[in-house]
Amino acid sequence: MLDYKKCEVFATIAEEKNLTKAAEILGYTQPGISNILRSMEEETGFPLFIRHHSGMTLTKDAEVLLPRVLAILAAFRSADQTIDSINGINEGHISVGSYSSMSISFLTKWIEGFSQEFPNITFSIIEGGYKELENALDSYTIDLALMSRQPWHNYDWTHIMNDPMLAVLPADSNFKKNYVNLKDFHNKPLISHSEGSDPDAEKIFEEFREMNIEPICQYRIFFDRTMMSMIEHHLGFGIIPELVTRHYNGELKRLPFRPALSRELGIATLPNVTQSPVVKLFIKYCVEHIE
């Protein structure tokens, strides 16, 4: 039967792709970790890794096994923290994934306040786009993700806010109205996100296509701050969430849409996974301290 030690060794080698490095992380000698891996392969009945000159990769069978092993490790961590909570220790660790805009606007304040109340609970943070956060959540690398909700998500969801989408123009733009609609972008220079990098932006482009609106997209940009700098320097217009624009110090004109467009922001966690008491406590704290 697989035990925690074997699962931990398997998952660490899978992540590091190197036996020696995994041994150093877990505090084993190389012969020791090799023996544990060999024992696990004997129990499973199939090889777990393919060895290359550059490292180790999972076999096809091991790729199927890995998500289950990660779930076992997550369950062990949750059980440990439940025991600590019952004993009144309130110790634990929370791994958070987040959009950078949500980190700046919410997460840092939440962690500061939460840590004052529960100083023995530690945090690690991963920032990224929606693909990185989905992958980290699905692989049990993080406990929760601060992100926008998408139609294909089957995560458990805690609503935080609806974040308005804004039309962003150079500060000295002579645009006459104090609002915009999608038709205002027809034949206009629109700086867009790199294809596949922002599903909330892709939804707007779907509306453009449905309404036969054709903006001129000369530039496709991954980073929001680069996009806003380009807009400030008269290289085009943009459609950017209000939360993203909030901490940009350059000179820009920000206009709302009529009818309004927005993205839903919240906290995603894996379904059918028992969250540890400290994770539940942190989510509760976040909801109670939305500004």
Image (cartoon, rainbow, N blue to C red):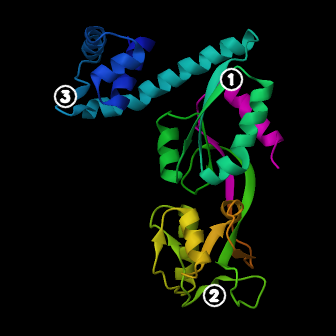
User: In which quadrant is the N terminus drawn?
Assistant: top left
Could you say where residue 198 lies in the image, as x and y percent from the top left?
Answer: 53, 62
| Residue in the foreground of this view, choosing between 32 and 202 | 32
| Residue in the foreground of this view, choosing between 220 and 251 | 251
Q: Is residue 127 above or below residue 150?
A: above
Q: Is residue 28 above or below residue 135?
A: above
Q: Earlier in the sequence, mark 2 or mark 3?
A: 3
The residue range painted magenta reads: 264-291
Secondary structure beneath label 3: strand
Label 1 or label 3, whichever lies nearer to me, is 1
Label 2 or label 3, whichever lies nearer to me, is 3
The residue labelled by disc 3 is 51
- Identify the residue at horizontal 50%, vertical 33% (top origin): 140
Could you say where residue 251 lies in the image, as x and y percent from the top left?
Answer: 69, 73
Query: Is 171 left or right of 229, judged from the image as shown?
Result: right
Q: Quadrant of residue 177?
A: bottom right
- Residue type, label 2: Lys
- Residue type, label 1: Ile
Label 1 or label 2, whichever lies nearer to me, is 1
Q: Earlier in the sequence, mark 1 or mark 3?
A: 3
**Disc 1 from disc 3: Cα separation:** 38 Å
Query: Is 41 left or right of 251, judged from the image as shown?
Result: left
Q: Earlier in the sequence, mark 1 or mark 2?
A: 1
Could you say where residue 27 lies in the image, as x and y percent from the top left?
Answer: 40, 12
Which numbered disc covers residue 121? 1
**Disc 2 from disc 3: Cα separation:** 56 Å
- Residue type, label 3: Arg
- Identify the residue at horizontal 45%, vertical 81% (top origin): 218
Which numbered disc covers residue 183? 2
Give the crowd class for mark 3: few <14, some 14-19, many >=20 residues within 10 Å: some
Give the crowd class for mark 2: few <14, some 14-19, many >=20 residues within 10 Å: some
